[in-house]
Amino acid sequence: MEWLVIIITLVVLWVASLFKILYESLSASQAAVLNDGMGGVFRNRNVLLVIAHPDDESMFFTPTLNYLSSRGCNLHILCMSTGNADGMGSVRKEELYLASIVLKVPQKQVKVLDHPDLQDGFGKSWNSKVLSKIIKEEIVNCAIDLVITFDNYGVSGHCNHQDVHQGVRKLLQDTSHKEVEAWELVSTNILRKYSGPVDIWLSLLSAKFHLSGVVLCLLNEHPRRSLAAMAQHKSQWVWFRKLFVSFSSYTYVNCLKKIN
């Protein structure tokens, strides 16, 4: 009986959370920023999303990209590798271009690198100085004033995700471009990570009581777009990634923390 109550409670929470997302997508209200209405800081900005591999944008950042595109932001994606760990780099590069179309990011504003020192793989550490230089060049060339990337854990703990974060931090330490703002995607524990839309409530509480820095929680106004974007990565669209996108909280909400 106790297990039945728990299961029913979880189902009710899941459905209520989906209705919350549906309501926000239909109303297009400011509540798409779940805490304090601070989403105005992301309006009409030149934004650079810095990722490690093709499909990072679709697996982890779609709530952010959907929110920004609907608020008049000019979006750019800088992908530091082709994801060639399995020898499919050229295929994955093209898949990222297709996914960017779904996510309303102009293909000409998507840059995928194949740098000899930035090759995909666990155990292949990337130099933060090299990353910082590349990011700085992209900021200057595209007049970027807002950078978004992984935090120091990198959601999944992948070393390349962590290296990208360190590259952005290195840039902020060294750069004279003080007008550039940077935000990181907050990693969550494994229970929250696979709680699906239920995590929108936990994210709100976490952001409200966060002890250090500013945290914004962005609701995914178009969760089906996440599935459509990830489906463009056909080489990666295997059964366990389909489950991941369906059950991952990152499909439904992103918490972004300002990097100081």
Image (cartoon, grey):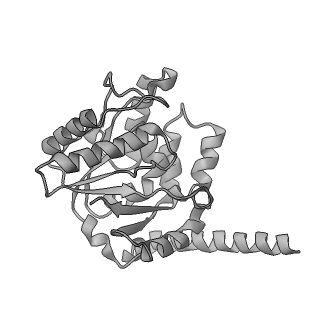
The image position of residue 19, as x and y in percent, is 58, 73
Along the viewing direction, whichever of 128 and 215 lies nearer the viewer? 128
- Furthest toward the right, the residue is 1
Please indicate, yes or no, whether residue 76 appears anywhere in the rendered image: no
8 vs 232, left or right, is right
Q: Quadrant of the N terminus?
A: bottom right
Q: Residue at x 35, y 46 (%)?
A: 165
Instruction: Indicate the position of residue 172 as horizontal and vertical percent values.
Output: 21, 50
Residue drawn at (61%, 45%) of the image: 242
Q: Quadrant of residue 248?
A: bottom right
Residue 11, x across and y down, in percent? 71, 69
What residue is rendered at 49% in x and 39% in y? 232
Q: Nearer the viewer, residue 100 or 257?
A: 257
- Number of labelled discs? 0
Image height check: is 234 above or below 1?
above
The answer to whether residue 27 is seen in the rendering is: yes
Q: Percent position (x, y) of residue 167?
A: 29, 42
Q: Quadrant of the C terminus?
A: bottom left
| Residue 7, above or below 53 | below
Q: Is residue 150 left or right of residue 200?
A: left
Query: Which residue is situated farthest in the bottom direction here?
Result: 36
